[in-house]
Image (cartoon, rainbow, N blue to C red):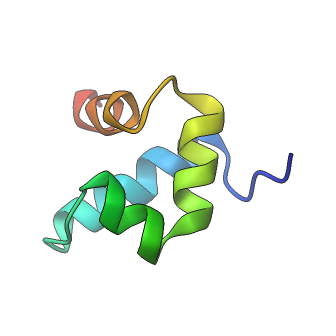
Amino acid sequence: MDVPFTSKEVITQIQKLQNQGDSLRKKEVKQLYPDLMRSALYYYPSWQHAVEESQVG
């Protein structure tokens, strides 16, 4: 499977989207940033889990 981002990059990208005020809704991210979604689901059990991880650090 082609995974464009590392797990650390996934978290960084989610934080970046959040800081810009962009939506973190799964449907929108999947449409606008398919590589980010694919990578997030590779490293984390769900998109929600990846978003929660991005808010911990």
Q: Residue at x 67, y 45 (%)?
A: 6
Q: Name the quarter where the N terminus is drawn.
A: top right
> x%, y% of residue 42?
66, 36
Q: Quadrant of the C terminus?
A: top left
- Using residue 4 as the reference point, say whether residue 2 is left or right of it: right
Q: Locate residue 54, reporting x and y percent.
A: 32, 38
Q: Residue extending furthest right?
A: 1
Image quarter for residue 41? top right
In the displayed structure, would residue 39 be above or below residue 42? below
How many callouts does the rendering have? 0
Q: Is 38 left, or right, of 4 in this rendering?
A: left
Is 42 left or right of 33, judged from the image as shown?
Answer: right
- Quadrant in the picture for residue 20: bottom left
- Which residue corresponds to the image point at 54% horizontal and 59% vertical from the top-left? 36
The location of residue 43, given as percent across then percent down, is: 61, 31
Q: Which residue lies furthest to the top in this view?
A: 45
Farthest residue toward the left? 21
Q: Is residue 48 above or below residue 24?
A: above
The residue located at (21%, 60%) in the rendering is 18
* Residue at horizontal 40 percent and vertical 39 percent from the top: 47
Between 23 and 31, the residue placed more toward the observer is 31
Q: Please name whichever residue, 9 or 25, is drawn nearer the observer in this view of the structure.
A: 25
Q: Quadrant of residue 34?
A: bottom right
Classify 33 as above or below 1.
Answer: below
